[in-house]
Image: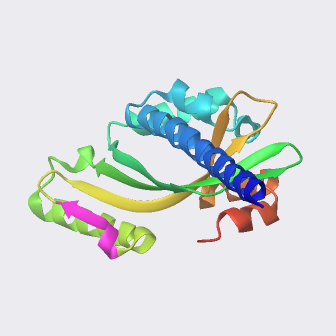
Amino acid sequence: MKHLSTLCLTLFITLSVAAQSHKEVIIKEAQTYYDYMTNQNFDGVLDYMYPKVFEMASRDQMKAGMEQMFSSPDMKIEFLNNDITSVSDKKEVEGVTYAAVYYNSKMKMTFLSELDKPEADKKTFIDFMKATMDTQFGVENVTADEKTMSLVINMDATMFAIKDPKYNGWKFIGNDDAMQMLVNSIIPESVRAELLKKE
């Protein structure tokens, strides 16, 4: 009986370590992915994207879109921080392993084209933009600074981590409206439901 207890304890510890290790690896890899995003290292970001994303738009098109978005003369976008809050347990289906990554992101948008406008116009514009973002992210998650013509958006979001034997290491795909059709075609519904179930 003592040996059985010891065996069960050893198995439990082994399973706990294995369960933690996938989370630790995902956290490390996701943080690198977010650091690339914050530093606008688009090749690094694209290296971490799940390659099936490029069936929707080629890697070159994705990179060009990112460069255009982040180098617009009208608006400057900065990620102030991306912090991982938790990682789900993993689920394997047909040799592919999935996990959900929960994170908090703070993004700053500065409206460069509005900086030299009259004060009344600046106020009208920033109030309109804040109201628009309030609708999407919630009033409590958007702060406006009329002096710098910027908005800071605080958002909690999720993405999926995918370890597919066809590719090297963990890859990521956003879980947002823009990616929904692609996510639905890549990740089985039962997997999505289980991973996104709050503990």
Q: Quadrant of residue 76?
A: top left
- Is 175 included in the stretch rendered in magenta? no
Q: Is residue 122 above or below residue 34?
A: below
Whole-percent x, y for residue 167 in the image: 75, 29
Image quadrant holding the N terminus, namely bottom right
Q: Is residue 48 above or below residue 4?
A: above
Question: What residue is shown at x 76% (from left), y 46% (from top)?
Answer: 97
- Is 141 included in the stretch rendered in magenta? yes
Whole-percent x, y for residue 105 in the image: 40, 53
Whole-percent x, y for residue 103 in the image: 47, 55
Side of 94 relative to 11 (left or right):
right
Image label count: 0
Question: What residue is shown at x 63% (from left), y 52% (from top)?
Answer: 16
Whole-percent x, y for residue 100 in the image: 62, 55
* Residue sitting nearer the eye, 14 or 135: 14
Question: What residue is shown at x 53% (from left), y 26% (from top)?
Answer: 44
Protein image colouring = rainbow
Side of 165 relative to 34 (left or right):
right
Side of 70 relative to 165 (left or right):
left
Q: Which residues are magenta?
A: 139-145
